[in-house]
Image (cartoon, rainbow, N blue to C red):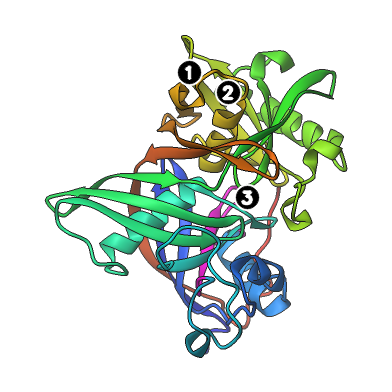
Amino acid sequence: MRAVYDVRTVDYHTAGEPFRIVVSGAPPIPGATVLDRRTAASAPEVDAVRRLLCHEPRGHADMYGCFLVPPDDLPDDLRGGPSGGPSGGSAPADLGVLFWHKDGYSTACGHGTIALGAYAVEYGLVPAAEDGETTVEIDVPSGRVQARVRRAGGVVEAVTFRNVPSYAVAGDVPACGVTVDVAYGGAIYASAPAAAFGLAVTPEDLPGLIAAGRSVKAALEGHPAARHPTDDRLSGIYGVIFYDDLGSEGDRHHQRNVTVFADGEVDRSPCGSGTAARLASLAEGRPDPRAVTLRHEGIAGGVFLASVAAVTEEAGRPAIIPEIEGTAFRTGEHRFVLDPRDPLGPGFTLR
């Protein structure tokens, strides 16, 4: 009996959010840059693999993962096409990545970047000392990011994700009878206190939070605040962040959040790129943005620690370079197959 697909993955979780890394079995994805490859990944032969791994019965409605692809600055003779050049940073990238979820492909993923840093070190993709910090350079659709992996005695203790420039887009944007803040952290997010919807960031209120997230996203469809200033491929409200304040003081913020992204998908972690967007909103207009910090707790109990590494400018507006610390743990190594007799094919979703 021959399997139609034979796909190998290494799975991690970051603060409770799954991340499935495809290490073999995906078809080549053409493109000069990772962002170009994101568009090409919609081809049926590629997207069928995403569905196989993300949809039931092998995944679930909140599954998340990635395809590893060549980085933007891989030499022409190794990439099979023209180089798009590095997206940022001075060192060549160690890898490129396309992030996926049940509804398609995202432009950024902080929890996935943290997991990729741990994976690259633990599986020897980059040389790393037993003790100390190793930097993994990663090209993602929104640009060049870094994962600084800290080890002690050969064990990964933490990973710090350095994001692309992040910035506030608009504040007090009307949506669904409340106002939301819109910010960019590699993807565009709207955020609002959960209390504005009569909710709290608790598992008990999750159905209401999902419904509110879908409503806010629909209300902002086509809104000027949802448009990326320089590249329309990065446009659109990707996620809606609901938060509870847990005792912020001055520039030191402590919040619990849940991010509802794509079509009602729930991020169990504090959401890495969403944390970058929240930090950008909190730093907006502050006398010293570098003083702003955010302890961000996820609905599953995981914690990200966010700070401002640098102040810069992006697309003609003030921006920050966020750094977000978290931890990822390997959960398994898997071989997924599809029996050619299976009438459900690469799977289904019920939500």
Q: Are marks 1 and 3 in contact (CB under 8 Å)?
A: no
> Mark on residue 253?
1
Residue 31: image location, x then y, percent: 64, 77
Q: Is residue 294 visible?
A: no
Q: Name the amino acid type tagged 1.
A: His
Q: Nearer the viewer, residue 344 or 69?
A: 69
Query: The residue tagged with tag 3: helix, strand or loop?
Result: loop
Of mark 2 and mark 1, the one earlier in the sequence is: 1
18 lies left or right of 259 = left
Q: Residue at x 48, y 18 (%)?
A: 253
Which-is-in-front pick, marks 2 and 1?
2
> Mark on residue 314?
none
Q: Residue at x 67, y 70 (%)?
A: 36
Which-is-in-front pick, marks 1 and 3?
1
Tell me which secondary structure the magenta stretch mostly adopts: loop
Q: How much space separates mark 3 and mark 2, taking CA atoms?
A: 31 Å
Which class describes the residues within 10 Å of circle 1: few (<14), some (14-19), or many (20+)? some
25 lies left or right of 158 = right
Which-is-in-front pick, marks 3 and 2?
2
Q: Name the amino acid type tagged 2.
A: Leu
Residue 135 quadrant:
bottom left
Q: How much space separates mark 2 and mark 1, taking CA atoms?
A: 8 Å
Q: Residue under circle 2?
A: 282
> Mark on residue 61?
3
Whether 144 is drawn above or below 261: the answer is below
Q: Are marks 3 and 2 in contact (CB under 8 Å)?
A: no
Residue 127: image location, x then y, percent: 24, 67
Q: Name the amino acid type tagged 3.
A: Ala
Q: Are marks 2 and 1 in contact (CB under 8 Å)?
A: yes
Residue 117: image location, x then y, percent: 37, 56
Q: Which residues are magenta?
A: 55-71
